[in-house]
Image (tube, helix red, strand yellow):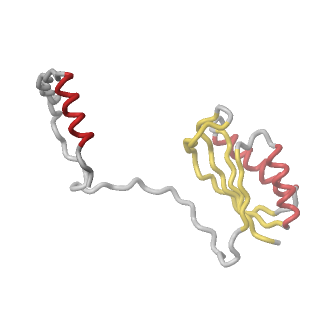
């Protein structure tokens, strides 16, 4: 049996309890396809880069499981037919990785006092300088200048 990761995206319309039920349902799909789920992590709710079927926010869930290659093909087919899963991604884990990384909520980054933006009073809008009046050009002078440019010898 090979080790795999399954990352899937559910719509944000579900509550926490419904998410747990949906996660158990998808773990059941993995089990029915011939896999054995070892861990499941809820990675949280995130805004999507683009709407998927009028859904703009989704819940990401990551599951680790062991299965045969044929079971993964069956799992892909079953997840593709599931109406609840917006997107999913199955990847084979690196066999050298023995410890699964801990998914812990990060503390918000503290900003040092010198890094905090200083208060600047609003600047008054810049006044545009009026443009000087344009000189009227005589067409005869323009023709002379054009003739001079065209008749110059090019080096």
What is the residue that sits farthest to the bottom in this orientation?
Answer: 96
Q: Which residue is painted at 25% across and 41% down in the image?
A: 151
Observer-nearest residue: 60 or 105? 60
Position of residue 124 relative to residue 2, above or below, is above
Observer-nearest residue: 147 or 79? 147
Position of residue 140 relative to residue 34, above or below, is above
Position of residue 14 relative to residue 102, above or below, is above
Picture coordinates of residue 106, whole percent (x, y)? 47, 57
Q: Which residue is painted at 73% across and 67% down in the image?
A: 92
Position of residue 65 relative to residue 96, above or below, is above
Say which quarter of the image contains residue 131: top left
- Image-based side of 46 in relation to 149, left or right: right
- Image-based side of 131 in relation to 143, left or right: left
User: For the image shown, how many numbered marks are present on the structure?
Assistant: 0
Observer-nearest residue: 97 or 152? 152
Q: Quadrant of the N terminus?
A: bottom right
Say which quarter of the image contains residue 5: bottom right
Observer-nearest residue: 70 or 42? 70
Picture coordinates of residue 15, whole percent (x, y)? 64, 38
Q: Which residue is painted at 74% across and 65% down in the image?
A: 4
Q: Quadrant of the C terminus?
A: bottom left
């Amino acid at each position: 049996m090979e080790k795999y990761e399954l990352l899937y995206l559910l719509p944000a319309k579900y509550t926490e309890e419904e998410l747990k039920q949906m996660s158990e349902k998808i773990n059941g799909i993995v089990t029915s396809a011939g896999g054995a789920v070892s861990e499941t992590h809820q990675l949280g709710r995130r805004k999507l880069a683009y709407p998927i079927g009028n859904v703009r926010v989704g819940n990401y869930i990551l599951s680790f499981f062991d299965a045969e290659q044929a079971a993964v093909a069956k799992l892909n087919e079953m997840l593709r037919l599931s109406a609840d899963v917006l997107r999913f991604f199955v990847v084979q884990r690196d066999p050298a990785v023995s410890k699964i990384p801990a998914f812990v909520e990060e503390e918000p980054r503290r900003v040092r006092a010198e890094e905090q933006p200083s208060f600047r009073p609003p600047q008054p809008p810049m006044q545009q300088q009026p443009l000087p009046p344009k000189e009227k050009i005589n067409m005869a002078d323009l023709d002379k200048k054009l003739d001079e440019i065209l008749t110059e010898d090019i080096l």
